[in-house]
Image (spheres, helix red, strand yellow):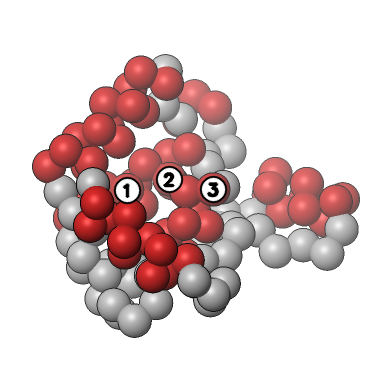
Amino acid sequence: MVGYEMLYGQLPFNARSDATLVTEILHKTPSFNSKYSSSEASKLMRIIKNLLQKNPAKRFASTGTLIVELEQIARYGRIQWKDSSNHFGTRGTETSNSKEWLQKT
């Protein structure tokens, strides 16, 4: 859910109560719109879709497999944003701090 929020700036499920949240997690599929232009972003969306699968058998077989997938994106690619004005939602200084962090790495 954290990865989804990082990509979309919102949680994958929007509920007003714990009971509704549990129902949405069990029965609703989050929306995965394509607001990114790079193949790395597509790979990251595929990873997040996999992590949010309802059926555990359809998720990654191990955390090692997940780590390999994430390392490939981190090592070989950069996510290109279609809308470069707001990458991380509307929570204040996160966008500028994130840009500074990306430049340092």
Circle 1 sits in a helix, a strand or a loop, which is it? helix
The total of numbered circles placed on residues is 3
Residue drawn at the location 77% of the way across and 62% of the way down: 15
Residue drawn at the location 27% of the way across and 26% of the way down: 68
Q: Earlier in the sequence, mark 1 or mark 3?
A: 3
Residue drawn at the location 26% of the way across and 70% of the way down: 81
Residue 48 is labelled as: 2
- Residue 103: image location, x then y, percent: 23, 57
Which amino acid, by three-letter code, is at mark 3? Val
Which amino acid, by three-letter code, is at mark 2? Ile
Residue drawn at the location 46% of the way across and 30% of the way down: 59
Circle 3 sits in a helix, a strand or a loop, which is it? helix
In the image: residue 65, left or right of residue 39:
right
- Residue 98: image location, x then y, percent: 38, 61
Residues at marks 1 and 2 touching, judged by CB atoms closer than 8 Å: yes
Residue identifier under label 1? 44
- Which tag is nearer the camera, tag 2 or tag 3? 3
Residue identifier under label 3? 2
Up-down relation of residue 101 to residue 54 (above or below)? below
Up-down relation of residue 7 to residue 86 (above or below)? above
Circle 2 sits in a helix, a strand or a loop, which is it? helix
Query: Is residue 41 shown to the viewer in this render?
Result: no
How far is disc 2 from disc 3 in space, using C-alphas?
9 Å
Up-down relation of residue 101 to residue 86 (above or below)? above
In the image: residue 89, left or right of residue 77:
right
Q: Quadrant of residue 36?
A: bottom left
